Image (tube, grey):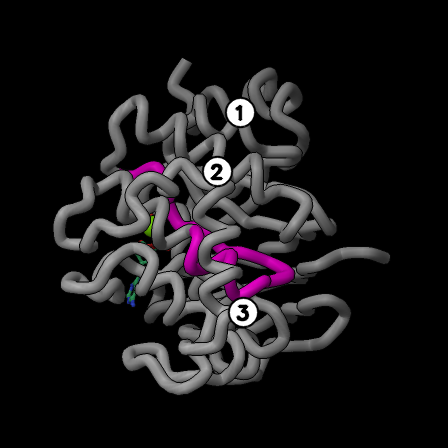
């Protein structure tokens, strides 16, 4: 099968609380798979098990056919697992272009925080220019991060994550804190990246979910209560009761 990600029976408990309860799902190549559910449903706990920050009590995680259940986070990254860089990891007094160059050089084993010889190579800057030319952030290439709007920082995080060329990108609420126009720009950027990598997207903004997702999995109290395409999820009575509040 061409599953980029396959999760089977993933269970994580915190004391007496079962935060993810026997969760199974797959993400196919080129697919955007959304994970939705109310606060406390276990969405972040699931993402943290996939990236290796939390160890499951039971279950398995396969990335491109490899069992990564017990691997440390860095080995998962090396196998193609990507996650958005947090705004806090951007270097404030450097420009958009320089932050992106650091990310590109880090992909080839360079240091993330300082320029080394690799970053002076023309290919790094050519790649940065190419990425920015295709992005809404292009005109802001020379602006320091401290002077960016919140939505622009989120765009930069996404470009830095994509520059690692992940097989699978984990996105935990990329629309959080964005205004309407910024959300639309983020949706456009994610749609443009679809095809380059598969995505598992946790998101509360249902307009964004339905605009982006090929498939949707619904978690409630740690359990998958429904999975299907956007139309099936929208029409599912259990989902409407539990989550969509209609
Ligand atoms: P979501 O991201 O869907 O809002 P979380 O995965 O953050 O949900 O949380 C799922 C449940 O697990 C919640 O009841 C939360 O309080 C609990 N939880 C999450 N992380 C921890 C932790 N490190 N220790 C104890 N309980 C936790
Ligand atoms: Mg969460």
**In this view of the protein, which residue sits in the foreground, 80 or 48?**
80
- Which mark, by number, is residue 123? 3
Q: Are marks 3 and 1 in contact (CB under 8 Å)?
A: no
Q: CA distance from mark 3 to mark 1?
A: 35 Å
Q: Nearer the viewer, mark 3 or mark 1?
A: 3
Disc 2 element: helix
Q: Which residue is mark 2?
A: 189
Looking at the image, is mark 2 or mark 1 earlier in the sequence? 2
Mark 1 secondary-structure assignment: helix
Question: Is 5 drawn above or below residue 200 in the view shown?
Answer: below
Which quadrant of the figure contains the N terminus? bottom right
Start-end of magenta stretch: 159-176
Q: Residue at x 50, y 71 (%)?
A: 122
Disc ID at residue 211: 1
Residue drawn at x 39%, y 55% as measured from the top left: 44
Please state which of residues 126 and 5 is positioned toward the viewer in this rendering. 126
The secondary element bearing badge 3 is classed as: helix
The mark total stands at 3
Q: In the drawing, does residue 162 fall left or right of residue 151? A: right
Query: What is the crowding at mark 2: few (fewer than 14 residues within 10 Å), some, or many (at least 20)?
Result: some
Asked if residue 66 lies left or right of residue 107, the reply is right
Q: Mark 1 and mark 2 in contact (Cβ < 8 Å)?
A: no
- Is-magenta flag for residue 80? no
């Amino acid at each position: 099968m061409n599953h980029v990600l396959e999760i089977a029976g993933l269970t994580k408990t915190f004391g007496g609380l079962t935060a993810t309860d026997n969760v199974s799902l797959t993400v196919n190549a080129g697919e955007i798979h959304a994970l939705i559910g109310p606060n406390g449903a276990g969405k972040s706990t699931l993402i943290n098990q996939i990236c290796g920050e939390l160890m499951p009590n039971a279950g398995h995680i396969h990335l491109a056919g490899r069992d990564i259940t017990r691997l440390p986070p860095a080995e998962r990254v090396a196998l193609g697992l990507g996650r958005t860089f947090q705004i806090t990891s951007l270097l404030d007094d450097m420009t958009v272009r320089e932050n992106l160059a650091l990310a590109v050089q880090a992909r080839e084993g360079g240091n993330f925080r300082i320029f080394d010889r690799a970053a002076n190579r023309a290919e790094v800057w050519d790649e940065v220019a190419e990425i920015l030319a295709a992005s809404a952030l292009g005109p802001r290439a020379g602006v320091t991060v401290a002077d960016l709007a919140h939505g622009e920082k989120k765009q930069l995080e996404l470009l830095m994550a994509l520059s690692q060329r992940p097989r699978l990108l984990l996105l935990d609420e990329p629309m959080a804190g964005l205004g309407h126009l910024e959300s639309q720009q983020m949706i456009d950027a994610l749609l443009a990246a679809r095809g380059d990598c598969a995505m598992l997207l946790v998101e509360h903004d249902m307009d964004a979910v339905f605009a982006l997702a090929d498939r949707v999995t619904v978690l409630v109290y740690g359990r998958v209560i429904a999975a299907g395409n956007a139309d099936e999820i929208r029409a599912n009575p259990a989902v409407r009761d539990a989550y969509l509040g209609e």
